Image (cartoon, helix red, strand yellow):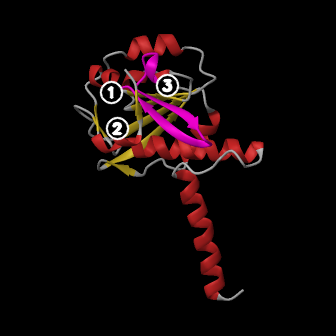
Amino acid sequence: MDQPERLAKKFGWMLLILLLVAGGVISHAAPAAEKDIEAKVKAAYLYHLTKFVDWPELPPNEVRICILGSEAVGSMMGDLANRMVRNRPLKIEVDDISDPAQCQVLFIGRSEKRLSELVKRLHGANVLTVSDLEDFARRGGMVGFFVDAGKLRLEINPGNARVGNLRISAKLLELARTVP
């Protein structure tokens, strides 16, 4: 295979991955591959959410994204550790989180059993709470993932974000379904 063919093939794969990460079709993949793709898309969303949310104050040395109850998303997030976010390195913590209130973003996966306790404990904290649990944004969370026509979408509760003194970009709100 010559150089132009290799570049075209590489570009084709990169374009495919970009489409999937941007919320492309995930329903036609094989079951195991579908879960990997869904975890990658969720990890990408978590990373990019940090660009569209303003916190009243960030720690000076790092931005923390914490993952509870989702090994798949946690392992995908590991690839993003130490990237720069708001001029600070990104720190990823998975499952062994001593104080969730110290996270800037907390993803609560489907297998996490302490949902009510966590939502209650973080009410009013400057922590962006995100989950793939059904109706999460309506049940006290800030950002929920849901699948619509085979695409992963966001559901945002701006009121819950305001209670946590977080400001969500109007651009992000335009792309999401907002709930009271």
Q: In the picture, residue 73 is in which quadrant?
A: top right
The circle drawn on residue 158 is: 1
What is the span of residues highlighted in magenta in the rendered image?
Answer: 137-157
Looking at the image, residue 158 sits to the left or right of residue 92; the answer is: left
Q: Is residue 120 left or right of residue 170?
A: right
Whichever of labels 2 and 3 marks the residue nearer the N terminus, that label is 3
Residue occupying the far front of the picture: 149
Q: Nearer the viewer, residue 62 or 177?
A: 177
Q: CA distance from mark 2 to mark 3?
A: 29 Å
Does the residue at mark 1 contact the one at mark 2 (Cβ under 8 Å)? yes
Helix, strand or loop status at disc 1: helix
Answer few, some or many: residues within 10 Å of disc 1's Cα (few below 14, many 20 plus, some between 14 and 19): many
| Element type where label 2 sits in the image | helix
What residue is shown at x 54% (from left), y 48% (from top)? 23
Closer to the camera in the image, 7 or 74: 7
Mark nearer the N terminus (1 vs 3) = 3
Q: What residue do we see at 61% from left, 70% from top?
A: 12
Give amino acid for label 1: Pro
Please name the residue that numbered disc 2 is placed on. Answer: 173
